[in-house]
Amino acid sequence: MPSNDPNAGPTLISILDPKKEQIKALIVSLMLSSSPRIQSQLSEALAVIEKHDFPKAWPTLLPELVTSLQKAAQVSDYASINGILGTANSIFKKFRYQYKTNDLLLDLKYCLDNFATPLLEVFLKSASVIDSAIALGGGSVATLRPLFESQRLCCRIFFTLNCQELPEFFEDHMREWMGEFKKYILDLHGLQIYNLWRYKFWFFRVLLPSIIVHVNPTF
């Protein structure tokens, strides 16, 4: 019942479980088929639900995101790729801020087991497409912007999944990650030439701490 007190704070309305399950079953596919503006709003709604339910009460979410990401990557659908990566980035954010506990580490392991490999695959695929586009002279701003946005999101997720500790998967594949990070830190793609300087700034701000923490002699 809404309060008549004008000074009262907002009233949180609980969603009944059957309705919530219906939303959870449809929200990912609906989000990916929507315009970017609606996609952003649905991603925020998904993030609200996952704070309470993910992963234990929403075991289908991450597998559905991974399947959708792999399908989108096969056809280079970067609107969908970036929507999925943005959603994943939102649901992984808790690993940046919460204290390390056994429950948190179990959730982190679940996310790593399901998402670390497809994340690296998309990251390396996008890196290859960027290199090819620039080498062939086809590196227009319209072509490169969604690709660099994908890399930005991949790097952000990398940073998030490494906040608690250095997982074995990333340790095993550090050369691949750091090889691409080096390109972005040194701006070997000439981001300013393509008027994509904001990505250069972002790579400095986020990647340098990761390189400092995880740098090894092979880098």
Image: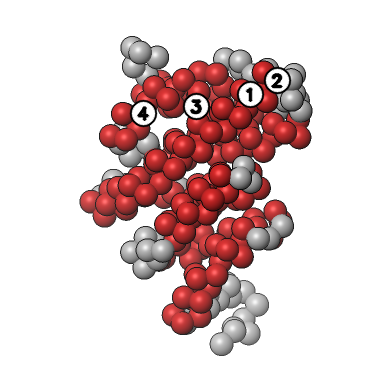
Q: Amino acid at mark 3?
A: Leu
Residue 18 visible to the viewer: yes
Q: Amino acid at mark 1?
A: Ser
Give the residue pinned by disc 2: 136
Q: In whole angstroms, how far apart are the C-alphas of marks 1 and 2?
A: 6 Å
Q: Nearer the viewer, mark 3 or mark 2?
A: 2
At which x and y percent is residue 28?
55, 62
Q: Are marks 1 and 2 in contact (CB under 8 Å)?
A: yes
Q: In whole angstroms, how far apart are the C-alphas of marks 1 and 3?
A: 23 Å
Q: In whole angstroms, how far apart are the C-alphas of marks 1 and 4?
A: 22 Å
Q: Nearer the viewer, mark 1 or mark 4?
A: 1
Q: Residue at x 53, y 73 (%)?
A: 23
Q: Amino acid at mark 4?
A: His
Q: In whole angstroms, how far apart are the C-alphas of marks 3 and 2?
A: 27 Å
Local packing at callout 2 (Cα closer than 10 Å; few below 14, some 14-19, many 20+) is: few
Q: Residue at x 44, y 80 (%)?
A: 17
Q: Which disc, if any, is residue 173?
A: 4
Q: In whole angstroms, how far apart are the C-alphas of marks 2 and 4?
A: 28 Å
Which sits earlier in the primary sequence, circle 1 or circle 3?
Answer: 1
Give the residue pinned by disc 3: 207
Q: Nearer the viewer, mark 1 or mark 3?
A: 1
Give the residue pinned by disc 1: 132
Q: Nearer the viewer, mark 4 or mark 3?
A: 4
At which x and y percent is residue 45?
57, 64
Say above or below: 166 vs 183. Answer: below
Which sits earlier in the primary sequence, circle 2 or circle 4?
Answer: 2
Q: Which secondary structure, mark 2?
A: loop
The residue at the far bottom in this view is 1
